[in-house]
Image (spheres, rainbow, N blue to C red):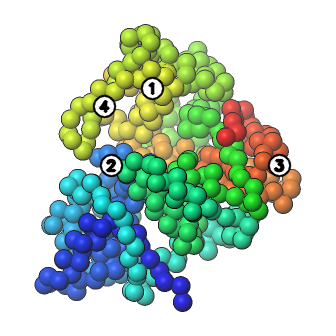
Amino acid sequence: MHKMKLLIPQNIKQKVCELSKLEHPFKFKVDMALYLLNLIIFSYFGKDFQDGDYLSLSSRILEKNAGKGYNKHLDLFVKKEIIDKLFYSTHETKGHCNLFKLNEKWHDFETPEIHIVTSTKIKKTLKARVFSSAKQKYHHLWKWYNDKKFTFDATGARQELQNTEFSKSRLWMENTIFNLEQGYKWFVCHSKDKRLHTNLTNMNRELRKYLKYDGHSLQNIDINNSQIFFLLVLLHKIKNRKLQDTETESSIILELSSVSLCNKEFQSFHDLVVSGTFYKVLGERLMKEKGLRDYYIKMEYDYKSKKVNYVRFDNPKDLMKPIAFEILFSKNNHYTPEKKWFREQFPTIYKVIETIKSKNHNTLALLLQNLEAEAILDITVTKIKEFNKNIPIYTIHDSILTIPEHTNEVKRIMIESIFDFTGLKPSVSIE
């Protein structure tokens, strides 16, 4: 029988072994402890997490996946300052969520090592990351994902990793390689963001070249400025009073229905997005108006050191992309000079963004992800299948991978499908 394994940093595993030898008012389970810490560590050090971010974990899902007593283990880790915890309430009718992150004293990892899992419960959880509902809904994608011709060169990826400086990014990549090498797949569709989550969706760009189908490398067809593009789609709905099919709180819909977007401002925003020059043009404008013409100094708070850093940007696109994400996804009370500047450029659009995030700053992210999922998963993938069911395709949220032979066909169908769905032509590039 195939042994189930977990990857865990040496110093964390050593600490858990020490805890297992102590007396506790509950039954301490090593497999459960390491599963929970693996979940927190490799989610927290994923490529989409920033220093200071907390990971949200549902009590209901944790009890189902780890078993009863998981909370006592987590409380012990908090007490021993292995993890930090914040409680917050949600609208969940069953259970609640807590926020977790690894305590900063454990951030300097030692080499990760393999732990053999013996717990039947944890083994079952590790095997159950392919949801039958997702397989059924996206059967065509699952067919290609589960095809034996779809391979990953773990040896080549590991060799490249040896030249990478040890960091949280490298640790994440090691875990990605480990999961693919062990054959641990996940194929999950979440009800909130509507996205399809697989081993590929959080894979670092550097590792994608080791993916192959029938010996052929995969090319990525990607929507440029995708989050901004789907914001424009949402703004079109607001401007044309077509919000009835938008999934969010009715009070926000009501408030948005009374918002008037300035035509000149909207047209300017529209032109920047559909031309694919949003980041470049606005970055250049910000450098010219608020920077030192050829470069810009941005103040950033380092949550790890609790210090303010000043970062120099010479490239307008590199400057504007994190600012755009800050505008879209940070809390309304998170003030920065760059957000203030954007509000001066697009006051009515900024008002829409603030309104959507007024009750929960994650609301806008979910709305944009819902639009993206519908455009890519429900519409574009279906159109590609109808055109030629033998084209191998894999999705990474706002992009589609295929073999070079079919790249141009997939790109054409992607542009046409999204235009039919949104009325807007996306700027698309091939990597």
Residue 285, percent from left and from top = 48, 14
Marks 4 and 1 in Cβ contact (< 8 Å)? no
Instruction: Give neighbour class at mark 3: few <14, some 14-19, many 20+ (Cα, 10 Å).
Output: few
Q: Is residue 356 left or right of residue 86?
A: right
Q: Is residue 92 left or right of residue 136?
A: left
Furthest-right residue in view? 387
Q: Earlier in the sequence, mark 3 or mark 1?
A: 1
Q: Earlier in the sequence, mark 2 or mark 1?
A: 2
Name the residue tied to disc 1: 319
Quadrant (top left, top right, bottom left, bottom right) of the C terminus: top right
Amino acid marked by disc 4:
Glu
Q: Quick check: can you spot residue 59? A: no
Of residues 370 and 227, the one nearer the viewer is: 227
Of residues 27 and 234, the one nearer the viewer is: 27
Q: CA distance from mark 3 to mark 1?
A: 35 Å
Marks 4 and 2 in Cβ contact (< 8 Å)? no
Name the residue tied to disc 4: 300
Q: Which label lies toward us, 3 or 4?
A: 3
Name the residue tied to disc 2: 53
